Amino acid sequence: MAEAFDALSDEHVRFIERQPVFFVATAARDGRINLSPKGMPSLAVVDAHTILWLNLTGSGNETAAHLLDTNRITLMWCAFEGPPLILRVYGRARATHPDEPEWAACGERIEPVLGARQYFTVDIERVQTSCGYAVPQMDYRSDRTALTKWAEKKGEAGIRRYWSEKNARSLDGLPTRAPDPAEDPS
């Protein structure tokens, strides 16, 4: 039932673009595996071999730490509406932080919002589809606004302090390369 591909097809890209949620999984050599749901307009397919994802500030920064330790990432989409399908992308990724010159180019593809912590450029090594027959059908209503409101309340300086206090190390104590709160991203 599973099929493997070296790159995304046009059909895969159309499927990804229709999904309101995707999942990101990473793991360091040792410690916990991280699996997180992601939403909002935060992902763009650059080409058949590359995905760009804007990562927003959250309670942890596991993906950044894991990629510094062991550069491997899996993204997954599943159809909650329409025909069943699961699509996974396996690859390697590199982070671009607000203090880096590449940030502006990434922002041309996905506009950064308040609380944007890093972009991840995913270099695709394998694409795999599977049936998704056991995934329930659910209706999408809307994106949540809680993260946006949280970021607005904190403001840019407050978010940068939060990165330093809460996002500088992973749950297992690995560094994340969170930007220094004293640095101005502009």
Image (cartoon, rainbow, N blue to C red):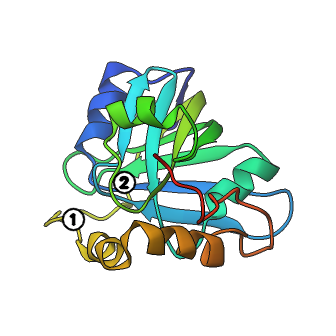
- 137 or 115: nearer the eye? 115
From the viewer's perspective, is the residue at label 2 or at label 1 nearer?
1
Image quarter for residue 168?
bottom right
Residue located 86% across and 64% down the image: 30
* Residue at point 76%, 49% (across, down): 68
124 or 114: nearer the eye?
A: 114
Q: How far across and how far down the image is residue 130, in percent?
A: 46, 42
Q: Which residue is mark 1?
A: 143
User: x and y percent of residue 179 in the render?
Assistant: 62, 58
Place of residue 49 in the rendered image (x, y in percent of width and height, measured from the top left): 52, 22
User: 180 and 38: which one is in front?
Assistant: 180
Q: Are marks 2 and 1 in contact (CB under 8 Å)?
A: no
- Quadrant assignment, res 8: top left
Q: Nearer the viewer, residue 32 or 166?
A: 166
- Marks 2/1: CA–CA distance: 25 Å
Give the left or right position of residue 75, taking residue 83 as reference. right
Q: Is residue 55 left or right of residue 27?
A: left
Q: Which residue is mark 2?
A: 133
Q: Residue at x 47, y 65 (%)?
A: 57
Among numbered discs 2 and 1, the one appearing first in the sequence: 2
Query: Mark 1 falls on what kind of element?
Result: loop
What's under tag 1, amino acid-wise? Asp
